[in-house]
Amino acid sequence: MTYTTIELIGTILFGLAVIHTFMVGRILAWSHHFPKDSLWSNFLHLLGEIEAVFAIWAAVFMAIFIGLEGWTTALEYQSKLNFIEPFFIFAIMVVCSTRPVLAAGRKGILFISSLIQKVFRTPAVLTDIFVVLILGPLSGSFITEPAAMTVTAFMLNSMLQKESSKLIYGLIAVLFVNISIGGALTPFAAPPILMVAGKWNWDFAFIISHFGWKSAIAVVINTVLLIAVFRKQLTEGCITLREVETRLAGSQAAIPAPVTLVHLLFLTGIVVTAHYQNAFMGIFLLFLGVAAVTQRYQDSLRLKESLLVAMFLGGIIQFGAFQKWWLAPLLGSMSDLLLFKGAVGLTAITDNAALTYLGSQVEGLSDSSKYALVAGAIAGGGLTIIANAPNAAGYSILSHKFPGGIKPLNLLIAALVPTAVAIICLWML
């Protein structure tokens, strides 16, 4: 492995950022030892915001970069980076978190859940959870994973009324893993697959036959296992989607069908143009005007939360190019089985889309090695918040359900079982 000084510094700072993500809970606890709104309290609270971690370390890295290489070289590097994904997640998260879009999603899920209840006589709340955790992630193959994560996380958030630590971690672990593998039915929705599909000529037929059906089976198994293990807690701690609708109907104005339709058209436009930043940002800016006009049927737009998620992903991208010096040789030297296992493990500390992109730069990979790399990347996408880009959106939506915030180590432990299910389905079926 050969590397430059700036590449080594980039890797060291990236490693420190990863370690930082595992310490955010402790840092937040330290912030409470100082007077509220004091300088130290606010500073530690900023360091304890997991969405800000990579942005902070990326800023430190760029300051060092400028000092060592000069302003011009740093700007040239910056101009070559692709920030489409953070911008897209910002736009899609704001649109998907609006009241009309969430209401439409709930009604669709509720319709399917009601049919299942009538046919199989299953408990309403468990059936709702079952449908949400299956159809939500699988819809990510068509509306993109960030959109699926946003809508699914908001539905779960509205249903959860009484939390227990084990239930919440189990639920978010299954959500993260299911979203990561649920987008594997098409070649354009899951970031790890999108990064390589064009270069390796993977079309829809290839993806559905090699990844899609296996991922769908894993999504169903993970959901059934979660319900079987936490049946009592889910029954006692959650309300049905119909109860959610009833509560909201009493406190919010009814949304006219044309307003919902317009919101869904904007959502469709952003999804269709997801790979063209100027196009979807133009649509998004126009949407902001429509949201202002339809303010009566809106909750406050989640601009701050969406921006924090975009910052998180932008910080990861800032470091990405400087991991190639050690990742590419490492991936190229592994056997298929070792590559699959390595991809699962590396995904926990490296965004899975960045991992598959770097793997696509390795010349001479066999077809089986290509499959092993991508299968491992999507299987490990629920292990940490940084493992899969949409995880940051789910964290932002559900983090208030966790006293003191989500502890990354607890999430890693909770995700081991659903990840194992994904590994078995993607490697052994």
Image (cartoon, rainbow, N blue to C red):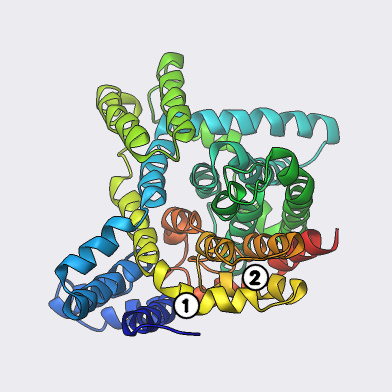
Q: Quadrant of residue 270?
A: top left
How far across and how far down the image is residue 39, in percent?
A: 13, 77
**Closer to us: 262 or 159:** 262
Report the residue at 29% width, 45% height from top.
303
Occupied quadrant, residue 309: bottom left
Amino acid type of the residue that numbered disc 1 sits on in the rendered structure: Trp
Say which residue appears at 35% left-offset and 69% top-offset.
54
The correct choice, above or below, for 166 with respect to 392 in the image is: below
Residues packed near mark 2 inside 10 Å, few (<14), some (14 to 19) or many (20 plus): many
Kind of residue at disc 2: Val
Establish if 339 lies above or below 304.
below
In the rendered image, which residue does mark 1 sit on?
A: 325
User: Which of the image's four quarters has the C terminus?
Assistant: bottom right
Residue drawn at 48 percent across, 45 percent down: 150
Q: Secondary structure at mark 2?
A: helix
Along the viewing direction, whichever of 345 and 320 lies nearer the viewer:
320
Q: In this figure, which residue is indicated by the disc labeled 2?
A: 344
Q: Secondary structure at mark 1?
A: helix
Q: Position of residue 67 (x, y in %)?
A: 17, 79
Question: In front here: 315 or 362?
Answer: 362
Q: Disc 1 and disc 2: Cα gap in Å?
A: 19 Å
Mark 1 neighbour density, 10 Å: few (under 14) some (14–19) many (20 or more): some
Mark 1 and mark 2 lie on one chain; the one further toward the N terminus is: 1
Tell me the tag on residue 338. none
| The image quarter in which residue 362 lies | bottom right
The structure residue drawn at horizontal position 35% and vertical position 47%, both measured from the top left corner, is 87
Measuring from the top left, give residue 335's x and y in whole percent: 74, 76
